Image (tube, rainbow, N blue to C red):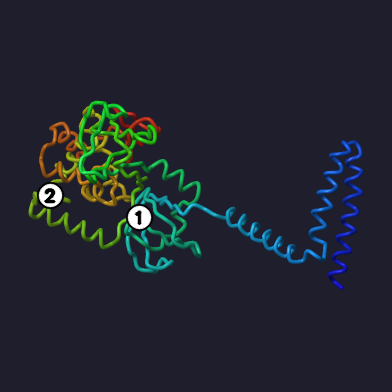
C-alpha cells in the first residue's frame, strides 16, 4: 500500500515536472527539448519502475556511500598540530591538568595528532607522546601556516661521500664533500635531479639521487630525555670532558662552535646575531634555560642534529670571531632584538643581516 502511494506521488511529480519542463522549453530547439525530456523521464523511470528494484537499491546504496564519503572529506583535517605558547607546555599522561607530566613542548614545536577529546589532544612530537590542552595548540590551516613559518626543509646524505657542486650539473666544480648522515638546509628544488643547499654560507647543489628530504619542525622532549641531557651537562661541567660528543661543559666554546657552523662565513654582525638568538631562547621561558639545552634539545639547529656542532666543539677549530660574538651574546649584546629564529634570507620577513634573516 505504502509503495503504491509512493509511486503515485512520484508519478504526479513526474507529470508536473514534464509540464513545467515543456513550458520552460517552448522556445528551445525541438531536438534539445526531446533530449532533455527523454533524459528526465529515463532518470525518474529508473526509480519508480517496479521491475528495477535491485538496481534501485544499488543506486541508493551508492548514493549513500558517496554522501558519507563527501561528508568525511569535508570534515577531514590535517593531523599536524603546532604549539602556540609563550612558555613551555606540559604534556601529560592523561587528558587532565591533574595527570602526571611526561614531557615538555617548547615554543613553535610541532607534532602529529593521535586522538582528540574534551578539549585535549593526544599527540606525538619526536619521542614525546601524551596529552596537551587544546587551549595552547593550533590545528588545520593555522598549524600549517605556523609550520611553514618556523620549519625548514633539510636534506640528509645517504651515501658515503657526496659532492657539493657550484652548479646543478655533474661537470660543475666540486666546492665540498659531505659524508653519510650529514644534514643541510634546502634552499630550493631546482628540478627532479638537483637541489640547492646552504653549504658553508654558499649556495651549493647536490644530486637528489643520494639524499633524503624531510621537513623539520622542532620537537618536544620527554622527561627522561630532559633528565639525561641535564645529567650530561652536569657531568661535563664537573669533568671538562673533551669526548666526541660534549653537551654542557664550556658554554662559551659550545656557543662559538654553533656560531661557527651557522655563520662561520658571515661578518661579525652575522655571527653576533646567531649568538643572540641562542641567548634570547635561553632567557625565554619557552625553551630550555641553558645554552647546551637550547642547542641540543629537540634538534632545534641543523648542525646540532647532524653532529657537526659536537665535532667542531671537540676539534677546537673555531674562528676567533665566533668566540668574540659568543662572548658578546652571553654578555647580553644583541643586534636582532628579541629574535628567536633565523634562516637563509629570501623567504621570510625580518631583520636582514648578511645572508640570513632573523625574527
Q: Vertically, is 327 above or below 89?
A: above
Task: Judge by depth and name the residue closer to the eye, 97 or 255.
Answer: 255
Q: Tell me how many marks there are.
A: 2
What percent of the width, then of the height, locates residue 152? Answer: 36, 41
Dot 2 falls on a residue whose secondary structure is: loop
What percent of the width, then of the height, locates residue 61? Answer: 68, 63
Q: Vertically, is 357 above or below 88?
A: above
Q: Vertically, is 8 above or below 317?
A: below
Q: Which residue is mark 1?
A: 105
What residue sits 42% from the left and 55% below the top?
112
Q: Where's the N terminus, which quadrant?
A: bottom right
Residue lying farthest to the front in this orientation: 51
What percent of the width, then of the height, locates residue 113? Answer: 44, 58
Q: Which residue is mark 2?
A: 244
Dot 1 falls on a residue whose secondary structure is: strand
What residue sits 44% from the left and 52% below the top?
80
Q: Where's the C terminus, which quadrant?
A: top left
Task: Say left or right for 316 vs 343.
Answer: left
What residue sits 26% from the left and 51% below the top?
297
Q: Which mark is residue 55?
A: none
Q: Nearer the viewer, mark 2 or mark 1?
A: 2
Check disc 2: other Cα within 10 Å, few if <14, some if 14-19, many if 20+: few
Q: Are marks 2 and 1 in contact (CB under 8 Å)?
A: no
Amino acid at each position: 500500500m505504502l509503495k503504491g502511494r509512493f509511486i503515485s506521488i512520484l508519478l504526479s511529480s513526474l507529470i508536473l515536472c514534464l509540464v513545467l519542463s515543456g513550458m520552460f522549453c517552448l522556445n528551445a530547439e525541438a531536438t534539445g527539448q526531446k533530449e532533455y525530456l527523454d533524459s528526465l523521464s529515463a532518470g525518474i523511470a529508473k526509480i519508480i519502475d517496479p521491475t528495477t528494484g535491485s538496481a534501485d537499491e544499488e543506486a541508493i546504496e551508492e548514493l549513500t556511500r558517496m554522501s558519507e564519503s563527501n561528508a568525511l572529506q569535508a570534515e577531514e583535517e590535517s593531523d599536524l598540530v603546532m604549539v602556540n605558547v609563550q612558555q613551555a607546555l606540559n604534556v601529560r599522561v592523561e587528558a587532565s591538568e591533574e595527570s602526571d607530566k611526561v614531557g615538555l613542548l617548547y615554543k613553535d614545536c610541532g607534532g602529529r595528532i593521535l586522538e582528540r577529546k574534551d578539549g585535549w589532544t593526544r599527540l606525538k612530537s619526536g619521542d614525546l607522546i601524551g596529552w596537551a590542552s587544546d587551549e595552547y595548540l593550533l590545528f588545520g590551516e593555522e598549524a600549517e601556516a605556523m609550520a611553514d613559518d618556523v620549519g625548514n626543509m633539510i636534506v640528509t646524505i645517504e651515501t658515503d661521500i657526496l659532492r657539493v657542486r657550484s652548479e646543478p650539473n655533474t661537470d660543475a666544480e666540486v666546492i665540498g664533500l659531505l659524508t653519510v648522515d650529514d644534514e643541510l638546509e634546502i634552499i630550493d628544488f631546482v628540478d627532479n635531479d638537483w637541489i640547492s643547499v646552504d653549504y658553508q654560507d654558499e649556495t651549493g647543489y647536490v644530486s637528489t639521487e643520494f639524499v633524503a628530504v624531510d621537513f623539520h619542525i622542532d620537537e618536544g622532549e620527554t622527561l627522561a630525555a630532559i633528565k639525561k641531557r641535564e645529567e650530561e651537562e652536569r657531568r661535563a661541567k664537573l669533568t671538562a670532558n673533551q669526548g666526541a660528543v660534549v653537551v654542557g661543559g664550556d658554554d662559551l666554546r659550545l656557543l662559538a662552535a654553533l656560531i661557527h657552523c651557522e655563520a662561520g662565513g658571515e661578518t661579525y654582525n652575522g655571527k653576533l646575531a646567531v649568538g643572540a638568538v641562542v641567548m634570547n631562547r635561553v632567557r625565554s621561558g619557552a625553551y630550555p634555560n641553558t645554552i647546551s639545552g637550547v642547542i641540543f634539545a629537540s634538534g632545534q639547529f641543523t648542525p646540532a642534529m647532524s653532529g657537526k656542532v659536537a665535532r667542531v666543539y671537540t676539534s677546537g677549530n673555531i674562528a676567533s670571531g665566533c668566540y668574540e660574538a659568543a662572548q658578546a651574546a652571553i654578555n647580553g649584546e644583541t643586534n636582532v632584538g628579541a629574535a628567536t629564529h633565523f634562516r637563509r634570507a629570501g623567504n621570510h620577513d625580518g631583520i636582514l643581516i648578511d645572508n640570513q634573516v632573523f625574527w
